[in-house]
Image (cartoon, rainbow, N blue to C red):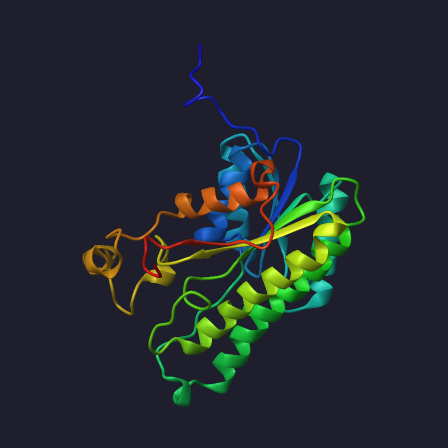
Amino acid sequence: MTSSASAPRTRFAGRTALVTGGGSGLGRAIALAFAAEGANVVVAGRTEGTLKETVGLIEETGGTAVAVAADVSRSADLAALVEATVERFGSLDVAVNNAGILRAGQPVAELPEEDWRTMLDINVTGVLLALQAEVKQMRAQPGGGAIVNIASNRGAHSRIANATGYATTKAAVSALTRGAAAEHIQDGVRINAVSPGASDTSMSLLTGESEAGRAERMKSGTPLGRVSTTEEVAAAVLYLASDESASVVGADLVIDGGAAA
């Protein structure tokens, strides 16, 4: 007999999950986690090559996935992305708005306007436009849906020098999540956020830093003493997207080893 601890989980069997920024890092880990629990997965982003790599990894383990190129700062792209998702799989049950960009290294007075506008376009407007397209579809289908936005522990929860622009955009995601959650739960759409800290991705590496160097730095950088694994962050996303969290609305779950505690 297979033990319950080792039995495969199928919380998302028959459901469709859309993950933006799914070509690498956290987005890829989240897409793989949904596929492992039975979801049909649509991975979206601007780089077709990396999206196809994610799809290949899912298919190697027997999962089902498709790649759709989309720029989240363009409303037409997001409308077409949702349309393609429903056309392929019949519904949009879960959406994870993970696409984001980091521009840091300068204090506010020296932050290039182009960097500021790029982060606003992707990190804030991209989430807003994605929510609009996703909610429109989810409230029109019988089962509604669940949305998880990826914010950050840098923003509403803590700040760090020379990353104020980025923190501002991620604080906006936290606020947008809470407001949208209250406004659309009666539409059958449940919206929450995950706010990761440093995780095992290239984004958490300082310029010129190796993974070994990061590990040494993190020993004193967080109470936990290490970065979060991408699987740990993905597990939080799947919880918020699952029926297990059916009464969780407008939450912003911080996964950062205690850094913002």
Q: Nearer the viewer, residue 113 or 155?
A: 155
**Residue 206 sits above or below residue 138 on the image:** below
- Tell me the residue at 51%/53% (across/down): 23
Q: Quadrant of the N terminus?
A: top left
Q: Position of residue 148 (x, y in %)?
A: 57, 52
Q: Position of residue 29 (x, y in %)?
A: 46, 46
Is residue 68 visible to us here? yes
Q: Is residue 78 left or right of residue 155?
A: right
Q: Position of residue 145 (x, y in %)?
A: 69, 45
Identify the image quadrant of residue 35: top right
Q: Is residue 143 left or right of residue 217?
A: right
**Residue 78 sits above or below residue 162 on the image:** above
> Which residue appears farthest toward the bottom when viewing the image?
109
- Tell me the residue at 42%/16% (across/down): 3
Q: Position of residue 126 (x, y in %)?
A: 61, 66
Q: Is residue 151 left or right of residue 179?
A: left
Identify the image quadrant of residue 131: bottom right
Is residue 71 visible to us here? no
Q: Nearer the viewer, residue 172 or 18?
A: 172
In the rendered picture of this protein, how many numbered marks are placed on residues? 0
- Tell me the residue at 66%/40% (across/down): 16
**Residue 69 sits above or below residue 239 on the image:** below
Q: Quadrant of the C terminus?
A: bottom left
- Tell me the residue at 66%/32% (across/down): 14
